[in-house]
Image (spheres, rainbow, N blue to C red):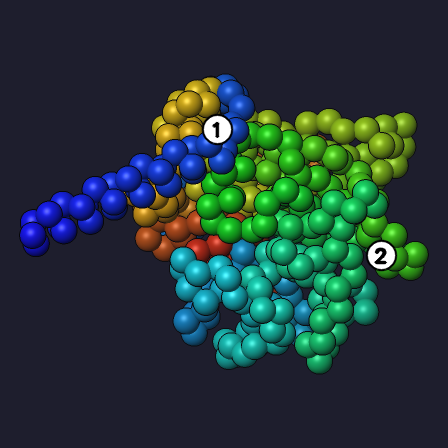
Amino acid sequence: MMTKKVTFSFLIAVLLFIGNFVFQACSIQPLAWTPPQKPELKGSLKENDLLASTEWIDLNGWYGPEDIAVDQDGNLYCGAHVSATDFTDGRILKIDTLGEVSEFCNPHNWVTGLDFDAEENLIACIPNIGLGSIDKNGKLTVLTEKDENDNPFLMLNDVDIAQDGNIYFSNTSSKVKFSRKHARKIIFEVKPDGGLYRYNPSTKVTQTLIDGAYFANGVAVSQNDDFVLLVELTKYRIIRYWLKGDKKGTIDIFIDNLPGLPNGIAKRSDGSFWVGFTTRRDDTLDKFQPKPFMKKLIYATPLWLQPKQESFGMIMHLSEEGKVIKTYYEPTGEIVSEASSVEEHNGYLYLGGDLTDHIGRYKLVE
């Protein structure tokens, strides 16, 4: 009798597993996309270990400082979630100049993009909630939750503020709420479900600039507010939307075929840009991208059985014209496992991470 019960329970478990596998496979509709042959790491892309001297600023048990903002006094701010695998709850942390960590704001959600406006309000991208403004006392006000066509901002990603006060931000998807699994789904599907938007604080109007971007991620406005850059993670590229001049309102490619998965982008004081990478290109992922059926099978596999993100530190310095000036690496991944963002302040680069429990601090040597 006991043997029959065990056998029956085992069969039920197998059927449930198969049923869930089929359901997950049917829940994704990936497109076939053939990535370009990844570039050789030579010249300005040559591999090195320059980031090996990076120090850590501990977050006292919090994880995921994807983006970093610095106030006028040199204090750091970042979003954080409760563990390396739990993104369902989060805070905005403040790290003072002595390294003391405190909770600045509790949006009950992970925050992915941050930037200070001229009044020192902290503008924040909050997935599943919207674009928010946080005053000096940590009070959150939601500025916008959807675009002009009532599409919700479910995966707000990054934000940058122009000199004229306009706020530019990205949304990775208006179709699925943020989760690790949904983020992976978007990478596999390679569909233009994201976009670039502008919010005018004076008129409180939200405007779509790019409707259809491939895993819309980092955002950076140029030094003279003549264009804004948008990272497309799944396409390994950065596109440019022109705000002024003869090309106003048009889109072109700023740089293509990057050697890794680009994440955040930030403008330097001289008009050039820093780009942070989640990791380097994965040959296996590139191999499967043209094969929708294989991507369905991989996606349907339980997350804990899927290949883990490789730990590999990489950031890139780009000119204002989109040329690679220099690339910085930490190839072991032991000191810099990822660099989701790069924030420069007083001769140091502060490196973020979606999964790290610290902020990287690198003394810049150019």
Q: Considering depth in this image, is 126 or 65 the residue closer to the camera?
A: 126
Q: Amino acid at mark 2?
A: Gly
Q: Nearer the viewer, residue 190 or 311?
A: 190
Label 1 vs label 2, nearer the camera? 2
Q: Residue at x 70, y 57 (%)?
A: 130
In the figure, is residue 158 to the left or right of 46?
A: right
Is 357 displayed left or right of 265 in the figure?
left
Whole-percent x and y of residue 75? 61, 72
Task: Examine the image and state in which quarter residue 335 appears.
Answer: bottom left
Extreme residue toward the front, this view:
1
At horizontal 42% and vertical 28% (from top left) the residue drawn is: 295
Residue 273 appears anywhere in the view: no
Report the residue at 63% width, 63% height from top.
Answer: 69
Which residue carries the number 2 mark? 165
Residue 24 image point, x, y percent: 43, 38
Q: Nearer the viewer, residue 314 or 170?
A: 170
Q: Secondary structure at mark 2?
A: loop
Q: Which residue is mark 1?
A: 43
- On residue 305, the disc is none
Q: Residue at x 63, y 42 (%)?
A: 175
